[in-house]
Image (tube, grey):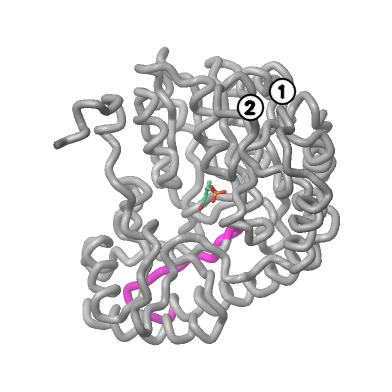
Amino acid sequence: MSVERFARKELLNIKGRAASRVTLRRIPGLINLGAGDPDFNHPAFIADAVHKAMMEGHTHYVFGGDPDFKRAIADYYRKYGVEVDGEKQVVLTSGGSQAIFQAFAAILNPGDELIVLNPAYQGYNGPTTYFGAKMVRANMTKDENGLFRPDIGNIEAAVTDRTKALIICNPDNPAGCVYTRKELEAIAELAVEKDFIVLADEIYTEFIWGGRKHETIIDMPGMLERTMVLMSFSKTFAWTGCRAGYIIAGPELAALVGRVPMGICSVPVAFQRAGIEALKRGWDFVKEMRSHYEKRIEYCVKRMNEIPGVRCPRPEGTFYIFPDISELGVPSAKFVEGFFKEEKVRIVPGTQYGSNGEGHIRLALVRPLKDLEEVMNRFERYAKKFK
Ligand SMILES: Cc1ncc(COP(=O)(O)O)c(C=O)c1O
């Protein structure tokens, strides 16, 4: 029997999971740089905090989420110069994925248009389709260092009278750029002028390199009531399996998101208590992860650029690299498939992030340096076959 006849029709337009987002069975010798799942384990005090909270009876309904946790989040976000009221402006979600889904659920009607950059994180695609909305792509363009950046002209050209929102990722996965204040101001001006919402996926804010600073669009003129910042603990505290995230928005928009009937609050209460501890005491751990990521980026960018036909810009943020392999003259999906088969390394073709990602591949630097040295040796051997 086919269950398709029972399905919500939009669901039938959503493909299954991309290969890079399937947990692989153990393959001897495989090095997986596909999904962005940090290889670090969070410090023991976080697990202890979960246990302690459960033993103290934090195991009951907390409608709307733990106010202490929401306050701690608001205090944290203040470091970007923004005043946030934890009670009125923070909505808790089960990680960044649910923040995306819930934000979309709050604003997208069938036929609405959502502007998505090209390339962009692929996790925006499914929810857009699910809500019957249309994704309108705005190509990023490369700067003098070969890094994809938002192109305000292309974004403006994508606006129509059906545009409901634009989603940006800052720092950007997969492109690696960190938005400048000027870029954000231009987007904010356009959003106010054309009257659309900006969804700002900021889950990589703790991973910014080269002295760059995170700027947020929510505090720009006219943006408080038209911005939703989508956040997650997944990368910040290497917490991908624990599922905690949140949305920060102006009070009216946050109340609207809070009306989405997603249940009580999707972060288990004991994990909310542990989240408070993480925000208090987790920063040495974050600093340590940062120092590893920086070394990995430095090493891999250098190795990539030594390979004929490969150009790899240094990312300004995130722990991904997105090298340009177009000179090798092979479609990126084919390159990635062959690399997996021949060299047992899982990476992601740029086309997974949109058509503009063709000629690129993404590597998540979520393995220790010694594994990355091995990956680069295998990569060099494999890439040389095409040149
Ligand atoms: C840009 C971006 N947004 C959202 C997510 C989803 O985050 P989470 O794992 O917390 O659901 C990811 C995960 O890789 C991501 O890269």
Q: Earlier in the sequence, mark 2 or mark 1?
A: 2
196 w.r.t. 202: above or below: above
Verify CB contact (< 8 Å) between mark 2 and mark 1: yes
236 relative to 199 in the view: left or right: right
Type of amino acid under label 2: Thr
Q: Residue furthest top?
A: 161
Q: Could you say which is closer to the camera, residue 190 or residue 106?
A: 106
Characterize the local packing of mark 1: few (<14), some (14-19) or many (20 or more) Cα atoms within 10 angstroms: many
153 w.r.t. 283: above or below: above
Q: Is mark 1 within 8 Å of ligand 1?
A: no
Where residue 188 appears, as percent x and y from the top left, is 62, 27
- Tell me the residue at 69%/55% (across/down): 206
Type of amino acid under label 1: Gly
Where residue 32 appears, as percent x and y from the top left, is 42, 71
Reading the image, the residue beneath label 2 is 227
- Tell me the residue at 41%/33% (across/down): 127
Reading the image, the residue beneath label 1 is 250
Secondary structure, mark 2, is: strand
Quarter of the image for residue 116 reads top left
Which residues lie in the magenta part? 306-318
Q: Could you say which is closer to the camera, residue 361 or residue 280?
A: 280
